[in-house]
Image (cartoon, rainbow, N blue to C red):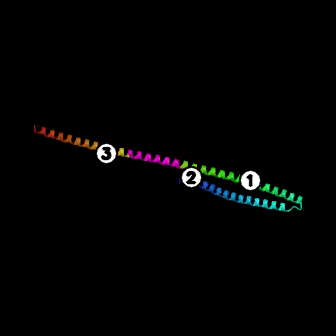
């Protein structure tokens, strides 16, 4: 297997890995959405509890502040995670596109080489055919010269015989 084919296979393997990473990122996004939903439920429950607990205004305000702080932290972490996941997916998609483009370029180059080899083979066949024709012509020419020489020899013998009669 030549280097071009090895590079193509390597690119395709990397592209496959990028696709797997993209799938994992989708799974992580789904988990993130589930966490967001759970967080919303927690906020709702804490909100209901703080509304029901009117006996201690200070305690309720403290719980609300804690809940808000936890909620803000979770939201910030989840947003950061979402941003990282999107960046990784974009990078994976770019790498996949690049690998596909490299594979297409390599295939195009291989196709051009095949076409060039085909043209060279056709030219070689034409040259071989021309050489065979030249050989046949040379053989025919040589046979023609031998025949002519043979006729001249016979004519010469005929003259010698005629001279003997005189």
Provide the secondary structure element on which disc 1 rests. Answer: helix
Q: Mark 3 or mark 1: name the one nearer the start of the chain.
A: 1
Answer above or below: position of 59 versus 106: below
Where are the magenta residues, as a range? 107-126
Spot occupied by residue 148 in the image (x, y as percentages of width and height): 23, 41
Answer above or below: position of 131 versus 74: above
Q: Quadrant of residue 50?
A: bottom right
Identify the residue shown where x is 39% and y is 47%. Answer: 125
What residue is disc 1 on?
Answer: 79
Spot occupied by residue 35 in the image (x, y as percentages of width and height): 74, 59
Identify the residue shown where x is 78% and y is 60%. Answer: 44
* Mark 2 Cα shell of 10 Å, populated few (<14), some (14-19), many (≥20): some
What residue is disc 3 on?
Answer: 136
Q: Which quadrant would the C terminus be assigned to in this image?
A: top left
Q: Mark 2 or mark 3: name the one nearer the start of the chain.
A: 2
Viewer-nearest of discs 3 and 1: 1
Which secondary structure class fits the magenta region best?
A: helix
Kindly identify which numbered label has been placed on residue 8.
Answer: 2
Viewer-nearest of discs 2 and 3: 2
Kindly identify which numbered label has been placed on residue 163.
Answer: none
Viewer-nearest of discs 2 and 1: 1
Between 63 and 81, the residue placed more toward the observer is 63
């Amino acid at each position: 297997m030549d280097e071009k084919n090895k590079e193509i296979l390597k690119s395709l393997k990397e592209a496959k890995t990028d696709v797997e990473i993209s799938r994992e990122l989708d799974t992580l996004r789904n988990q993130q959405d589930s966490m967001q939903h759970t967080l919303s439920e927690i906020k709702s429950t804490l909100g209901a509890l703080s509304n029901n607990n009117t006996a201690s205004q200070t305690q309720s305000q403290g719980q609300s502040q804690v809940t808000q702080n936890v909620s803000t932290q979770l939201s910030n972490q989840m947003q950061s995670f979402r941003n990282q996941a999107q960046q990784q997916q974009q990078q994976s998609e770019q790498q996949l596109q690049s690998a596909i483009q490299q594979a297409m370029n390599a295939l195009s180059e291989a196709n051009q080489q095949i076409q060039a080899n085909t043209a060279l083979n056709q030219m070689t066949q034409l040259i071989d055919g021309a050489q065979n024709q030249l050989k046949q012509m040379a053989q025919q020419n040589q046979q023609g010269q031998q025949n002519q020489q043979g006729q001249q020899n016979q004519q010469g013998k005929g003259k010698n015989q005629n001279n003997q009669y005189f």
